[in-house]
Image (cartoon, rainbow, N blue to C red):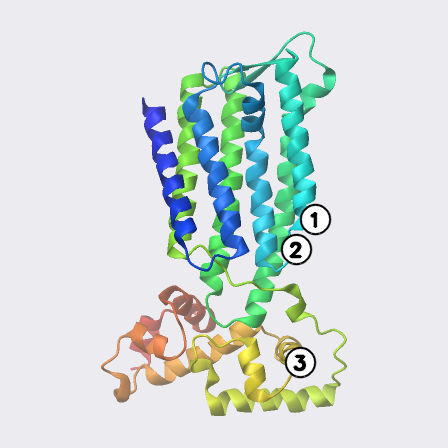
Amino acid sequence: MIKNFILFLGLSISLFVIVLLLRKPKKKVSDYLLIVWFSASFFHLGFFFLGFNYLLADNYLLIAFGNTLPALHIFVNSIYINVLRSKSIFPLAYIYGFVLLAYVGAYYYMGSSGSTVQNGMLLSYSSNAARWTYFVPPSFLLVYLVTGAYILRAIRIYRFNFKAIYSNNIHSNITWLGYWFWSYMVGSIIIVSIILSTDFGLVSVHMAYIIVSAVLSLQIFFLGQLGVTNNFTFDQVSDKHVKYAASGLKENRKEILKQQLLDYLQSSKAYLNPNLSLQDLALGIKLPAYQISQLINESLQTSFYDLINTYRVSEFKNRINNPQYKHMSILGIALDCGFNSKSGFYKSFKKHTGMSPSAFKKISF
């Protein structure tokens, strides 16, 4: 009863999120990938809800597909992040499509040939099972490791590129993406551990069903909630924007342009624009974006994101005890200085000053 309630809750959340995504106007490729991911989660939960022993016992193809779903989840994760980085999805889609079909074929053969018997979440091998079939379930671990390493590397690149181009939203975007990846990896580890514990008789099958159902449902709720608050989308950031190794800028020219950049920021106060991007700054200074990126990274030893927020923090410090702004709250002044979220402001202020805005206000009064 508890298992069915948890699964029904997860199924309801999955369906709700899918409907929200389908109703979203002007959907991007990343939105369609999210629809695929939540749909896969919906079917995965439904697979547990229906149960293996009775309704699915003789449907070897459906059982094969169900056993392959964990691989589908992490594959969609990696393709999704590729899309966010403005990379082509097709090489990955071809590779993953082949791997998924191979898993479905392997599990179908194992069930239909009598090599294995599905006993709830357990896979029991018969005496006539081919030796290679014993390596199919453990090979999932290799898939998780290889794909997980790829996703982590892609997130790091995405984070670097985002900080090189945008002056806001870095924390919400990257944090969401990190939660997206780690929640699934941790959930997968828990599920694999529970199934192995059941194999060794450490956990009952009934309890294993409840734990696995709860993990899947909570993961859907967690990611669905994060997705709703972040509008199910990220700004796309291509790797090509931060490549400037062959720009040909000489040191003396760098110094001139660096001073031009700093003078422009000081005089124009472009940092007060909460949506300021590297491209916007390039248009204002009338220099190529890649040259400004090179100046910021090589001459100023920082990122575009940190540079702009340094100016915003400085502006906030100038205004916090100014009688002209005494009618405004701390957050109100921060937003007026170019920040667009409370969390982003507090993290940037603490990073640059080592204290909270309220503590700074007290000591500077």
- Residue 211, x across and y down, in percent: 42, 28
Residue at 43% x, 40% y is: 219
Q: State how far apart marks 2 and 3 are (Cα).
A: 26 Å
Q: Tell us which disc is closer to us: 2 or 3.
A: 2
- Find disc 3 in the rendering and name its residue: 291
Look at the numbered discs 2 and 3 and tell me whether their residues touch, using CB distance below 8 Å: no
Asked whether 31 or 272 is in front, the reply is 31
Three-letter code, disc 1: Pro
Placement of 15 over or under 254, stated as above or below? above
**Residue 197 visible in the shown view:** yes
Asked whether the residues under the numbered discs 1 and 2 touch, taking CB atoms below 8 Å apart as contact, a structural biologist would say yes
Q: Which residue is mark 2?
A: 88
Q: Is residue 204 visible?
A: no
Label 1: which residue?
Answer: 91
Q: Position of residue 265 (x, y in %)?
A: 51, 87
365 left or right, relative to 98: left
